[in-house]
Amino acid sequence: MTLWSDPGMPDFFDAAPRVRLRDPLAAFLGAARDGVLEYGYADAVKLAGHSCPTVASAFLMTRAALAALYGDALPERGGVKVDLRKPAQEGVTGVIANVMSLLTGATMDTGFKGLAGRFDRRRLLAFEMPVEGQARFLRLDTAAAVTVSARLERVPGDPRVGELMPLLLGGAASAEQQELFRTLWQERVRRLLLEHADDPEVFLVQQA
């Protein structure tokens, strides 16, 4: 069984949930009609350079947090502050932060500086913050906030992944083993995106 149609990405990327929002800066500068932007999982993959449960969970945590904060209204890119509990260089925190930054526009000090006091994207992302869960999302206009966490252990991967990875890393895997590893690895990502995106047992959102 082939995972994808060369030279594309896995087919399930297109079937994954999307994040639609409005960016006032994009509207102001004419980058998108009415500033409306839509991000798919493939955009997060292109940013990270790979697809894994961490990238998928960061994408889905952000989606869940924005839905909780804005309901049926379009979330405002640049209008949310993101606080992460762990240090930036610990584990996969940096990867998670990059995906959250992609979707929300929030940055520490490298983002757009703004125009006449508007559209400033700096100081909207922080690490080592005393928050419950993995991250807190706070609306700048209303001060409403939620915390979000991903419980990835509830969507375990195939145990063969752990057996195959050392073979691939050591250059000892056959072509069949390499293909099996990639298929099994992406199968867990597929399940997260297509079967558990709205599962409160996997993606926990709470009022902050």
Image (cartoon, grey):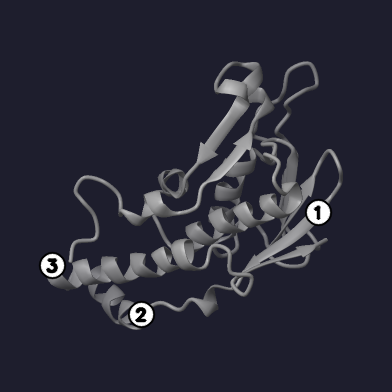
Q: Is residue 113 left or right of residue 130?
A: left
| Residue tagged 1 | 145
Indicate the position of residue 198 as horizontal and vertical percent values. Answer: 58, 64
Q: Residue at x 72, y 67 (%)?
A: 133
The mark lying in front, picked from 1 and 3, is: 1
Q: Residue at x 19, y 48 (%)?
A: 6
| Residue tagged 2 | 158
In three-dimensional space, the C-alpha distance between marks 1 and 3, rounded to whole angstroms, equals: 48 Å
Give amino acid for label 1. Ala
Give amino acid for label 2. Asp
Indicate the position of residue 196 as horizontal and vertical percent values. Answer: 52, 68
Q: Secondary structure at mark 1?
A: strand
Count the numbered circles shown.
3
Q: Label 3 crowding class (10 Å Cα cut-off): few <14, some 14-19, many 20+?
A: few
In three-dimensional space, the C-alpha distance between marks 1 and 2, rounded to whole angstroms, equals: 36 Å
Q: Label 1 crowding class (10 Å Cα cut-off): few <14, some 14-19, many 20+?
A: many
Give amino acid for label 3. Ala
| Image quadrant assignment for residue 205 | bottom right
Q: Secondary structure at mark 2?
A: loop
| Residue tagged 3 | 175
